Amino acid sequence: DVKVTQSSRYLVKRTGEKVFLECVQDMDHENMFWYRQDPGLGLRLIYFSYDVKMKEKGDIPEGYSVSREKKERFSLILESASTNQTSMYLCASRSQGVASGANVLTFGAGSRLTVL
Amino acid sequence: AQSVTQPDIHITVSEGASLELRCNYSYGATPYLFWYVQSPGQGLQLLLKYFSGDTLVQGIKGFEAEFKRSQSSFNLRKPSVHWSDAAEYFCAVRIYGGATNKLIFGTGTLLAVQP
């Protein structure tokens, strides 16, 4: 089975701190995604990457940046954390192919971030 | 604009009762549609997907969904709910954006199951 691992399940940070959220997948997937999940708002796409060193903004990229230096790893960076970035962050990956298994996202368990 | 609407924020059903969760989408092209489930403290797990062909699709855990193009709907159903089905359910549609496609999710429906 594809595994998507988010190393930090729970984080507590202070306003203004720089925060790194790490995500690693083990199935050689080309595409990786970062979503933010908030009650009543569902999942909103922050950034995605379709290949190494490639990235595209999602629907809510403000206040975030990403890094994809290796195919298996996709990092979400909060340059200066703010209280309104308190949320659950979900990473996902997917193969780029045309087979039926493509287009299906596999999610990590999530990283719950609290910014004080 | 592309969007997914789940009109029911919260639903409570009795164990053994039937279930239908509603999903409507807005997308100009042929949609790829998905239902995911999220148990407390977990990531999302794929329940089922529709790409083409038979409009009634079967998924895991006894769930099924029916694609109705005329109604722009993709409702999720289960004939008999189990207590372990209590979770949050998300409908999603694939859209093309930039160099690849991406999923747009609905706001979710939280299912509670009464004994």
Image: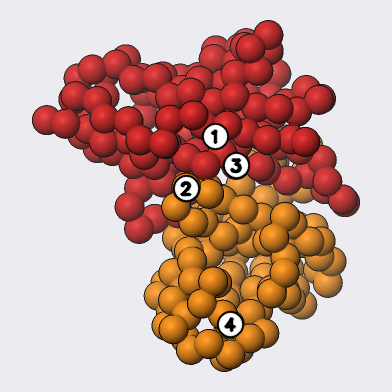
Q: Give the x, y percent position of residue B23.
A: 54, 26
Which color is chain B depicted in?
red
Q: Earlier in the sequence, mark 2 or mark 4?
A: 2
Tell me the subunit letter for badge 1: B
Labelled disc at residue A81: 4
Q: Where's the C terminus of chain B, which quadrant?
A: top left
> How many dots with numbers?
4
Name above or below for residue A11 compared with residue B91: below
Q: Where's the N terminus of chain B, which quadrant?
A: top right
Q: Where is mark 2, residue-wise?
A: A40
* x 59%, y 24%: residue: B24
Q: Earlier in the sequence, mark 1 or mark 3?
A: 1
Residue toward you, B60 or B104? B104
**Mark 1: secondary structure:** strand
Which color is chain A depicted in?
orange
Residue type (three-letter) at the residue carrying disc 2 = Gly
* x 44%, y 76%: residue: A114
Query: Nearer the viewer's eye, disc 3 or disc 4?
Result: 4
Residue type (three-letter) at the residue carrying disc 3 = Phe
Q: Give the x, y percent position of residue B79.
A: 32, 15
Q: Give the x, y percent position of residue B43.
A: 45, 54
B16 lies left or right of B65: left
Where on the picture, by quarter, is residue B110? top left
Labelled disc at residue B91: 1
Residue type (three-letter) at the residue carrying disc 4 = Ala
Asked whether the residues under the numbered discs 2 and 4 touch, taking CB atoms below 8 Å apart as contact, a structural biologist would say no
Tell me the subunit letter for badge 4: A
Q: Is disc 3 in the same subunit as disc 4? A: no
Q: Is disc 1 in the same subunit as disc 4? A: no
Q: Is disc 2 in the same subunit as disc 3? A: no
A75 lies left or right of A3: right
